[in-house]
Image (spheres, rainbow, N blue to C red):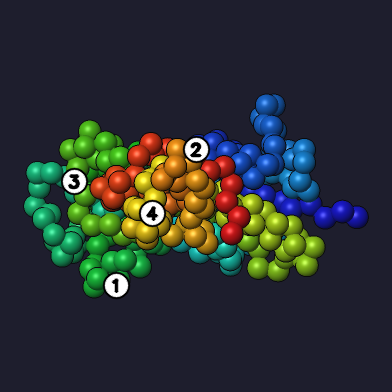
Amino acid sequence: MIETLKVAVQKKGRLYDGSLALLKECGIEVSNGNNQLRVQAANFPLEVFFLRDDDIPEYVQDAVADIGFVGENVIAEKNKQVDPVEKLGFGKCRLSIAIPKTGTIRSTNDLNDKKIATSYPLILSNFLAQKNITATIQEISGSVEIAPRIGLADAICDLVSSGSTLFNNELSELETVLTSEAVLISNKNLSAEKQTLLNKLLFRIRAVKKAKNNKYVLLNAPNDKLDAIVKLLPGMKSPTILPLAESGWSSVHSVISENDFWNVIESLKANGAQGILIVPIEKMIV
Ligand code: PRT
Ligand code: ZN
């Protein structure tokens, strides 16, 4: 029998698009046109299960799915026996305690003897215990941001990304409890065949991630400036240098990291580089 890797993906919500886009960038086509529960990938031995994100850690623990794409916030709250394998770079947010802008709570210590509404009672209770704060946790499953206004709680602990939900509800962030992004989790007892499939998928995911974090740069430089320019461009091994048709000039090709991108470009220009082209990289295998 040919083994198939069963992947749990959020059925609909904030992680759905990112998960399917990542599979696509890995060359794995999954169509969910008919809103099905499970879909076989066309060109990789992989089957996608569409589930609520809250259920994904348990399904992966229990081997209903072999791996899953889920937020670190959900992994921490559900506390199941799964292996976090790879951060995926999307679904970024933070779990924060927020307080009414006008009120008596001004510091984390002021939370003592107060009521905090959240959908993350386990993470919050661990956090409060660590800070030696005694507060009542009011667990609610949605619309946490309205809890202070309707008198249900004094503060909230909820996910924040842009901050506009807090702003619109006249709340301000007091402290970050956890930062989160989507990660790939795995069942702890994969068969050797499934582990091989996971390694294949991981190889592709890492190539996609690396490509996103790097840019290909091409530039022209006078030959007497090449030494200085090459020092600014380590590249994967070292930059490629090709002569231009015009004598005394060369074309330099290299890869630069997204993180120091603008600083490097400024230094390149300052060192005599001209006609700088920046090109996205589709996949990067090192
Ligand atoms: O139906 P199901 O249970 O699968 O979905 P869900 O409603 O529980 O989850 P969903 O789709 O809202 O979020 C899925 C995951 O996306 C979360 O578990 C996080 O890992 C991640 N994520 C990233 C977020 C946010 N950003 C986010 N901003 N999840 C929720 N929010 C909510 C937050 O709860 C608050 O209501 O967005 C609001 C705040 O956003 P801003 O932009 O106004 O700050
Ligand atoms: Zn959910």
Residue 275 visible: yes
Q: Which residue is mark 2?
A: 245
The tag earlier along the polypeptide, 2 or 4, is 4
Q: Which image quarter is the C terminus in?
A: bottom right
Instruction: List the residue tagged with mark 3.
Output: 172
Mark 3 lies on a secondary structure that is: strand
State the separation of the CA atoms marked 3 and 4.
52 Å
Amino acid carrying label 3: it is Ser
Please tell me which of labels 2 and 3 falls first in the chain: 3
Q: Position of residue 75 (x, y in %)?
A: 50, 58
Kind of residue at disc 1: Gln
Q: Residues within 10 Å of mark 3 (few under 14, many from 20)?
A: some
Label 2 residue SS: loop
Horizontal arrangement in the rendering, residue 90 relative to residue 194 (left or right): left
Lower position in the chain sequence, tag 1 or tag 2: 1
4 or 1: tag closer to the N-terminus? 1
